[in-house]
Image: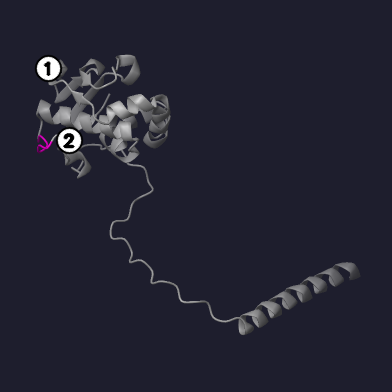
């Protein structure tokens, strides 16, 4: 018992001595140089939460309304096949850039369905997909377009875009990238299958 008390008292004295030497150091050290002013807080905070799939009427976002790279035209609006094609081209370009935010926003409903079937959240699933696409395929996807003549319009506001409709410097097949179904939900087109 006496040994435990001795060890405890020694520890307390050691801590007190350390605190005293830190205090003395603070009294003898010059004050730190003023740092540059802090940057103003950002007005657009980014969430670390992965995007979730829309359940009914998802809001339009600026990412979903930007024209295809290099098109120089305004994006098509509404339930038109042209708007579905442009939206899918945005998805392909984002896939090529490994832009997980845009990919998960456009593929949200399909990713949510895959997650329910055990594929994991969109951000994890597409991280795997990114590793499966070669560097040359990614570069090709960044400027890929879709041949609207090969697109099939389906009932219930759906459009089927086969891999064969993708026009790029690399040829894509259904086994490479899959045939995708887009559906008009609320006010934008989303990859659902």
Q: Nearer the viewer, residue 182 or 85?
A: 85
Residue name at image x 35 percent, y 35 percent:
98
Please identify the dominant SS of the magenta region. loop
Q: Secondary structure at mark 2?
A: loop
Say how many tags the image has: 2
Side of 27 relative to 127 (left or right) = right
Whether 181 is drawn above or below 72: the answer is above
- Residue on which the image places disc 1: 149
Side of 13 relative to 31 (left or right) = right
Marker disc for residue 97: none
Point out residue 69 in the picture as x, y percentages from the top left corner. Answer: 20, 36
Whether 47 is drawn above or below 7: the answer is above
Can you tell which quarter of the image residue 158 is in?
top left
Real-space Cα separation, disc 2 to disc 1, in angstroms: 21 Å
Can you tell which quarter of the image residue 140 is in?
top left
First to last magenta residue range: 72-77
Can you tell which quarter of the image residue 6 is in?
bottom right
Residue name at image x 28 percent, y 32 percent:
107
| Colour scheme in use | one colour
Point out residue 160 in the picture as x, y percentages from the top left corner. Answer: 19, 20
Point out residue 30 in the picture as x, y percentages from the top left corner. Answer: 57, 82
Whether residue 1 is visible to the viewer of this picture, yes or no, is no
Marker disc for residue 70: 2
Point out residue 191 in the picture as x, y percentages from the top left corner. Answer: 25, 28
Residue name at image x 74 percent, y 77 percent:
17
Whether residue 27 is visible to the viewer of this picture, yes or no, is yes
Q: Residues within 10 Å of mark 2 (few under 14, many from 20)?
A: few
Q: In the rendered structure, does residue 161 fall within the stretch colored magenta?
A: no
Whether 156 is drawn above or below 72: the answer is above
- The quarter of the picture where the C terminus appears is top left
């Amino acid at each position: 018992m006496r040994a435990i008390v001795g060890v405890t008292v020694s520890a307390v004295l050691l801590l007190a001595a350390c605190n005293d030497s830190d205090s003395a150091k603070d009294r003898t050290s010059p004050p730190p140089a003023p740092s540059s002013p802090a940057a103003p807080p950002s007005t657009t905070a980014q969430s670390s939460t992965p995007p979730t799939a829309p359940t009914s009427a998802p809001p339009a976002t600026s990412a979903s309304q930007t024209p295809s790279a290099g098109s120089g035209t305004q994006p098509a609006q509404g339930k038109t096949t042209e708007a579905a094609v442009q939206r899918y081209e945005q998805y392909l370009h984002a896939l090529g850039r490994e832009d997980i935010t845009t990919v998960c926003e456009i593929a949200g409903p399909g990713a949510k369905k895959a997650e329910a079937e055990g594929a994991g959240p969109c951000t994890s699933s597409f991280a795997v997909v990114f590793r499966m696409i070669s560097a040359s395929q990614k570069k090709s996807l960044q400027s890929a377009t879709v041949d609207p003549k090969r697109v099939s319009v389906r009932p219930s506001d759906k459009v089927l875009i086969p891999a064969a409709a993708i026009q790029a410097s690399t040829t894509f097949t259904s086994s490479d990238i899959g045939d995708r179904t887009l559906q008009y939900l609320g006010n934008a087109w989303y990859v659902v299958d």
